[in-house]
Structures are given as structure tokens and as C-alpha cells.
Image: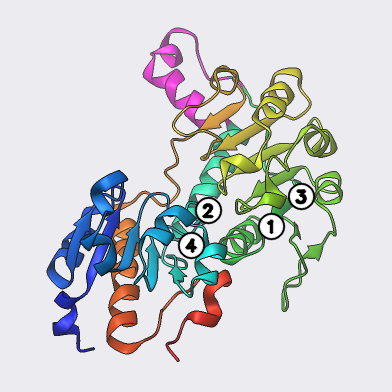
Amino acid sequence: MPENDLKSVTLLIRGKLHPHAAARLEETFTIVRGGEGDALAGEHARKIKAVAAAATVDPALIDTLPQLEIVSSFGVGYDHVDAAYAATRNVVVTNTPDVLTDEVADTAIGLLINAVRELPKAEQWLRDGLWVSEGAYRLTNGTLRGRRVGIFGMGRIGLAIAKRIEAFGLPVSYHNRRPVEGVSYAYFDSLVELAANVDTLISVAPSTPQTQKIVDAEILKALGPTGVFVNIGRGNTVDEDALAAALHDGTIQAAGLDVFYDEPNVPQALIDAPNASLLPHVGSATIHTREAMADLVVDNLIAWFSRGEALTPVAETIALAKRK
């Protein structure tokens, strides 16, 4: 179908989509918004062929849309979309990888330095006038010197983080479901083994049934009292009670977190931890990168309906990425 004919395609915008993506979709497709209750009843539901998703797309919604062909999801993580079920209905699911890789990797390094060197606290010391009234900020226990870094999840973002860590002159190891072909970093078969062999653990792990609260008390104990934990993957991969306890009792030295189990609700025990650097899920939050992600959401939809192929299908639906 030529691009100028795409107004014949009815598309559901699900959730609060980035305004740049929404504006492009409005220009290109016929738009339906919402998707709750009666909003998709009857005629609307029968016409919808695509979903642009910034909110949950579950089996119930998919079953409501008999003509659905594609779900284009905003973000590299897509646990809000039931991609496995979509595949059973011959619905391709796409996400927005690559365009946010460097931004998120930069954030991971920023969190690591903040956690180790206490830079936010040192800045607050200056802003509060304490440099003048009480003198220099105290020497920090933490340093990057001599650290050994483990990365949990050696995908695109993990590899980008590893390259940045190498630039600091630090050794890199990793744990993944399986070794990554062409990667020379030391591989450990289990997360606990990785944690026991490093003192800095950076998690880039996706949310899956297997990774739920996988970073628990055992992993943190293995990381040890000089250990630093950084999470820019998914909040539900961490047992936050265990992490808060480990920070308060000295099981580990510090943590840097950009993601949480029940966002935007951050446990008070983590907020109260003086050795935690906390960010409100801003890993990819620049105008440049979010607009690039928004463009990829739209470009996947245009490519599907004009050329019959998805640009960035997720693993569960990669076999459906081209129309037969």
C-alpha cells in the first residue's frame, strides 16, 4: 500500500504516547484513542489494524481486535505487551531498540559514578553553603580505581556499557542466558557466580518470568561490602526489600537506581538510604532520543502497511516480520 493511502488504516493509540509520534500518526493514519471498556466496542474494534502502544496490550485487548496486524511499542522494553500471545494470533510486535542505547549506557555510567563518588551529595554540600561554613566535603570511601565490573544482560545496551567501562581501564565480566558470540569478556554461567567475582554489578536485564526479583539477598551478599549495584534495566528484577536492607546494614557499599518495582512509587527505605543514588527513570529521557524512539514507532507502522515488513520486530514475533 502506498504511503499516501495509509489513511485507510485505522490505528489505536494506547496510552500516553510521545506527542511527536502521535502527531505523525494523526497525519498518516485514521486514529482511535483509548481502548478501555466500550471505547473499542463494535465498529471501531472491527476496523483497527494496528496499535501504537505506550500502555498495556494484553490478550483481552488483542482478542477484541479481529483485524489486528501489528503492535508498535514505544521503548526497548516491551513487558507491557504480551508478545508471546500476539504471536499466536499472527500479530507482529515491534519495539524501539538501538536509538536509545547510547543514552541509557551514559546514564548507567552516571549512576555508577554518582554512587561511588557521592557527587549529588557533594553538590548539595556546596549548594547548602557548607563548603563555606564547614569546609571541604569529606573524602569518599568509594572509587572506581581497581574495580571489577560485571554486567547482567549483555545485549545492545550491555555492550555499550562495557565499552564505556573499558575506557575507564576496568575489567568487564558478564552473565547472560547464554554466551554472546564474538564477545571476549569473561562469561559466568550464573548471576551469583558473576556477583562473587566482581565488586560492581550493572543490571540491564529485561523483565521476564525468570528475572523476577533475581537480584536478591544472595546476589547482594555475594557482591560484598565494597559492592556497588546499578540498575538501568527493569525494576521488577530486584528484590527491593533485600536491596534496602543490604544498603542499610553494609552488605553492599552503594547503589545507583533508575528503575523501580512499582513506579513511580519508590520504597521509603531506598529513599532513606544515604548510600543510594536514585533517578526517576530518566535513562533515555532527552528530547533527541525520545523523538528518535517516537519516529521508530511510526516508521515501523508505515513500513508494515506500505512495504509489508516490520523494521524492529521483537524476538517472539520475528518470524512474522514480513508478510507472506
Residues packed near mark 2 inside 10 Å, few (<14), some (14 to 19) or many (20 plus):
some
In this rendering, the answer to whether 82 lies above or below 48 is: above
* Disc number for residue 148: 3
Give whichever of 172, 306 is nearer the camera: 306
Q: Within the image, what quadrant is residue 298 found in? A: bottom left
Q: Earlier along the polypeptide chain: callout 2 or callout 4?
A: 2
Q: Does dot 4 land on a helix, a strand or a loop? A: helix
> Which amino acid is tagged 3?
Arg
Q: Within the image, what quadrant is residue 163 found in? A: bottom right
> Which amino acid is tagged 1?
Gly
Are dots 3 and 4 in contact, CB under 8 Å?
no
Q: Nearer the viewer, mark 2 or mark 1?
A: 2
The N terminus - image quarter:
bottom left
In this rendering, the answer to whether 30 lies above or below 197 is: below
Residue position for label 4: 101
User: Which range is magenta?
Assistant: 118-138
Label 1 to label 4: alpha-carbon separation: 21 Å
Residues packed near mark 1 inside 10 Å, few (<14), some (14 to 19) or many (20 plus):
few
Residue at screen point 54% across, 41% down = 111
Q: Earlier along the polypeptide chain: callout 3 or callout 4?
A: 4
Secondary structure predominantly adopted by residues drawn in magenta: helix
